[in-house]
Image (cartoon, rainbow, N blue to C red):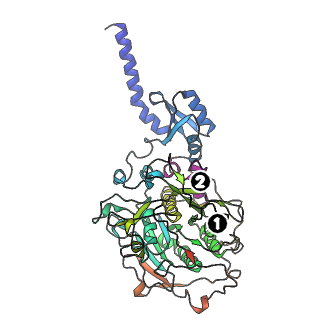
């Protein structure tokens, strides 16, 4: 064999050896693959990684990329570097499967817009319970069943004394619940697996606060939060979703609903609240619970029905601005326009918009009510992967891994926040003074300074028992004479269930 031929074979052998060794070496050291833009050298890419706070781990000249060790914050910063085309988790570290059999069949874009399917290889919400404080949940739908056929809506509470059923007669709560944790793969009456929520293995607790017709008071919402705190250990509740808004503006320092949100937060529950649908009105973010600085407030983006975020825009009707106490809201955005999710059979939503029915068993609706549960689902994923994280750590991780839109508002990024990295996460909210109604030593509402009293819970009467839940409860004293509220001393009023058809 000639010397040139031997030289060529040696070069090929060396190249093949390098390729053979790369996966193992790369998988053991790099957490991300950093793809560089055309014309950017690997040396410049190395500088970009270090400038973002990461550490270069391997060179991949074959694809013009680098391996890098990045925490969530560094990954988010690097993604915005003009020298970088894309930052993706290292498939050698995370499972190469998408973690969910139906990911390739999804008919909706919103899970992809927040990169939830990319995160399902690490977490699907299993073992985490989200409390849905809303109009109830149709927990017997196939979308909420587990692999054994049991409902993942493991608890049911009814706190509004005017309610006559534990189910969802209005429709809002079931739609919200499906965005969080629906899984249509067990459907037989609709195309299986086309509609899946953000955390398809998470459990839910339905805390019904409406009167069967979508009407609820802030007091009802406070009772709902009280139930979530009282039963968090029993059900494994780690997240609370509040897709509602008070109609009376008030400082978080004195608003009773904000105080209840902070009490839940300080007791270890991540509270996710809808920003509201007031656009850029002067008082757009002046209403509880979205104006509370502790909570994660979520605005809406229109993802245009596409999987990428290049065309995502903040919805004009999504509330944004500065609260009366000087806090910028919302902290995060998520898809909230044309969201298809579960619907309670026979509910009022169906009568309000028959044309919104999709595939015979799902419903299309929009609003920040739909954006908040997207983030609640992401929180469930995060807490499965990091069960020891506090609410403040979860909030910091989500906000620092989000992707900035052209409006400079940040869209939640499930893949980035779950990327392998340091578990030493800073905490948000450290410089914020809590509500004046909070007892600083315990984190509880100080009832001597508030205009309501602590509710009492007993087993539900048969008429309000949900057959599909592990246990059912009702508030024995809600609305009774001992619970009467003096309007002159309280700031709560009727909540508004906001819906935006066709947005």
Mark 2 or mark 1, which is nearer to you? 1
Mark 2 crowd level (few <14, some 14–19, many ≥20, 10 Å Cα)? many
Residue 228 image offset from top left, x and y in percent: 53, 73
Residue at image position (47%, 39%) is 28
Residue that mark 1 sits on: 291
Mark 1 crowd level (few <14, some 14–19, many ≥20, 10 Å Cα)? many
Span highlighted in magenta in the image = 392-420
Residue that mark 2 sits on: 399
Gap in angstroms between the C-alphas marked 2 and 1: 17 Å
Outermost residue on the top side: it is 2
Judge whether 209 appears above or below 413 on screen. below
Residue at image position (41%, 71%) is 153
Does residue 461 belong to the magenta stretch?
no
Could you tell whether 385 is left or right of 218 in the image? left
Residue 149 image offset from top left, x and y in percent: 31, 68
Of 378 and 441, nearer the camera is: 378
Outermost residue on the bottom side: it is 481
Q: Secondary structure beneath disc 1?
A: loop
């Amino acid at each position: 064999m000639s010397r040139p031929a031997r030289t060529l074979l040696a070069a090929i052998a060396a190249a093949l050896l390098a390729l053979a060794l790369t996966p193992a070496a790369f998988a053991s050291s790099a957490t991300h693959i950093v793809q560089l833009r055309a014309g950017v050298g690997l040396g410049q890419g190395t500088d970009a990684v270090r400038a973002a706070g990461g550490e270069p781990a391997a060179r991949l000249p074959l694809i013009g990329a680098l391996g890098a060790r990045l925490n969530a914050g560094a990954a988010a910063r690097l993604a915005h570097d003009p020298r970088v085309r894309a930052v993706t988790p290292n498939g050698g570290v995370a499972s190469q499967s998408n973690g969910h059999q139906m990911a390739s069949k999804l008919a909706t874009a919103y899970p992809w817009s927040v990169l939830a399917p990319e995160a399902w290889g690490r977490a699907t919400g299993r073992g985490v319970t989200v409390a849905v404080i809303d109009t109830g949940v149709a927990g017997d739908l196939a979308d909420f069943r587990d692999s054994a056929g049991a409902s993942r809506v493991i608890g049911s509470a009814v706190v509004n004394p005017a309610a006559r059923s534990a189910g969802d007669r209005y429709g809002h709560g079931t739609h919200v619940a499906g965005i969080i944790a629906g899984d249509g793969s067990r459907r037989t009456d609709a195309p299986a697996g086309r509609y899946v929520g953000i955390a398809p293995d998470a459990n839910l607790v339905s805390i019904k606060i409406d009167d069967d017709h979508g009407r609820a008071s802030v007091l009802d919402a406070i009772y709902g939060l009280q139930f979530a705190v009282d039963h968090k250990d029993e059900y494994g509740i780690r997240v609370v979703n509040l897709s509602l808004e008070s109609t009376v503006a008030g400082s978080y320092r004195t608003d009773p609903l904000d105080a209840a949100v902070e009490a839940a937060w300080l007791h270890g529950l991540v509270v996710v609240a809808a920003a509201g649908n007031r656009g850029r009105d002067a008082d757009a973010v002046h209403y509880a619970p979205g104006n509370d600085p502790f909570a994660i407030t979520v605005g809406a983006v229109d993802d245009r029905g596409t999987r990428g975020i290049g065309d995502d825009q903040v919805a004009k009707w999504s509330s944004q601005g500065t609260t009366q106490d000087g806090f910028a809201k919302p902290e995060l955005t998520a898809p909230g326009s044309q969201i298809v999710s579960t619907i309670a059979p026979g509910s009022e939503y169906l009568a309000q918009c028959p044309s919104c029915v999709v595939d015979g068993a799902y419903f299309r609706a929009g609003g920040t009510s739909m954006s908040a549960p997207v983030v609640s689902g992401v929180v469930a994923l995060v807490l499965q992967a990091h069960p020891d994280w506090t609410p403040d750590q979860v909030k910091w991780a989500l906000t620092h891994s989000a992707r900035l839109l052209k409006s400079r508002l940040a869209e939640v990024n499930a893949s980035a926040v779950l990327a392998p990295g340091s578990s030493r996460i800073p905490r948000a909210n450290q410089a914020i003074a809590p509500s004046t109604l909070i007892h600083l030593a315990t984190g509880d509402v100080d009832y001597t300074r508030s205009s309501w009293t602590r509710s009492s819970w007993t087993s539900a009467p048969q008429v309000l028992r949900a057959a599909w839940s592990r246990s059912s409860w009702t508030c024995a004293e809600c609305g009774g004479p001992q619970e009467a509220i003096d309007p002159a001393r309280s700031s709560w009023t009727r909540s508004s269930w906001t819906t935006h058809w066709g947005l």
